[in-house]
Every structure is written in structure tokens, then in C-alpha cells.
Image: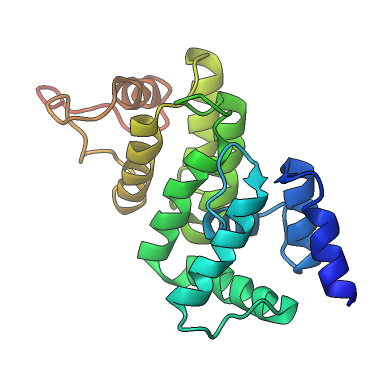
Amino acid sequence: DADESKTSREKDGGVLDLEGIVTYGQSLDLDMGSYESFVLTDVLQVEGFQIPRQGFVSGWKRIWMETGGRVSADWNDHEKFLRSRADLVRKDASHFKRVYASTFVAGREPGSRELGMELGLRAWSTLFEPTMHGWQSANVDWYDAWREYLTERWARSVSKDLWNQTLVFAAKTLQDESLSFWSEEQAWPAIIDDFVVWCRARGIVPAAASGAA
């Protein structure tokens, strides 16, 4: 039928590339310009923005098994399942963390252990939007400061440790925008340590009290 033809067409050539993934997601009524794109890459365990034919098949088979057969090969089942997963990102912290972690793997170039900075910044902006109000606290636009800092001071790519620790740091900034939770003795990546110093020097947050970290 039409759905089967569409699925087959999307998988022609054995590998679904970035353009194919976007087209596929749109056909399932996902907003591929938002965090919903990473919900899809998480479900299908995408690496390097490519889905081999076997990965596509095994990804949905895994979902079929995880759901006890409730999600069949039917196109409508796939659409409903992805919509429910996208909604969970806004409500469930553990699910969001899983999608966040898998985004690093999805965005790496094949054979690379790190994520390109440009893509990392776009991914942070997209992922933080539904869960952290775009990574903004009451008085600080943290994402805007983070983007400016990285653009100015960090030309390298994003390591897995930096990716993971940025999420931890971001969550803490929303609880304490003064950054009093931070100290030099803690095991933050050096780039986050420098970001705190940069924020204080710029007056984005108050300078540490004399004798404090």
C-alpha cells in the first residue's frame, strides 16, 4: 500500500542519510526542526545521522518487543508511538536524559569520538527548549551565555564528558543561578570551570565573595 511504498522509498540504497531521516520523521508528523528529531534518532539508535537498513528494521523490532507487541509494523502505530515518546520528553526526566545521551551518538561523524561544536550548539539549543525553557533561569539566559562563551573561547569539538556534564551543570544553574554550587575542587570539565570564571568576569552572575571559590 501507499505507506509501505513510502517506507521502501525512504530506505532505498541501504542507508537512510540525514535528508532521508528528516523526510521520514516529517512523514510521521514529527517536527524535525525541534527536539522531536532527537526522539526519532533515539528510538532508531541512529549513529552519525545514518540508519543502515538493518538498523531501521532492528530498531522497530526492538520497540515491538519492548512494548509487548503493541507497536506493530503499521505506519499509524509508529506515528502514535513517536508522538507519545515526544510528549514524554517534556514530562519524564529519565526519558529526557536518555534522549539527551543518545543525541551525542547520533550527531557524531562516523568514526569520530566527539561531536562537532556547531552541531553541539544547535543540539543543546533544541534539546533544552522543552525541558529547561531554553536553558534560562529567572535572570540569566544561560544558553545564550554558553553559546557566546564557546564561540569566543572554545574552537574544539565536544567530548562525551563535556556533553554529559553540561546537562548536569545546566540543571544546577536553574536551581542556583548565582553559581554558588560550583567550586574549583569539584570534578567539572575545565571548560565549565572557565565558563564560571567568564560569567563572573562579565557580570552575568555576581563575583564570588572574598575567600570563596
Residue 73 place in picture, x, y as percent:
66, 76
The front one of 191 and 43 is 43
Which quadrant would the C terminus be assigned to in this image? top left
Q: Is residue 118 left or right of residue 135?
A: right
Q: Residue at x 37, y 31 (%)?
A: 162
Quarter of image, res 148? top right
Q: Which residue occupies the extreme right position in the image? A: 2
Left or right: 171, with 51 as reference point: left
Location of the N terminus by quadrant is bottom right
| Residue 35 visible in rendering | no
- Asked whether 78 or 150 is in front, the reply is 78
- The percent position of residue 198, horizontal first and vertical second, equals 38, 20
Image check: 185 left or right of 125? left
Q: Is residue 23 above or below residue 154?
A: below
Camera-nearest residue between 20 and 176 = 20
**Res. 22 visible in picture:** yes
Q: Position of residue 159 (x, y in %)?
A: 41, 27
Quarter of the image for residue 182 reads top left
Residue 33, position as x, y percentages in the image: 72, 51
Taking the spot 28% from the left edge, 38% from the top edge, the residue there is 179
* Image colouring: rainbow
At a point 48% along the width and 40% down the height, the residue shown is: 104
Judged left or right of residue 13, residue 115 is left
Q: Nearer the viewer, residue 93 or 200?
A: 93
Total numbered labels: 0
Q: Is residue 25 above or below residue 152?
A: below
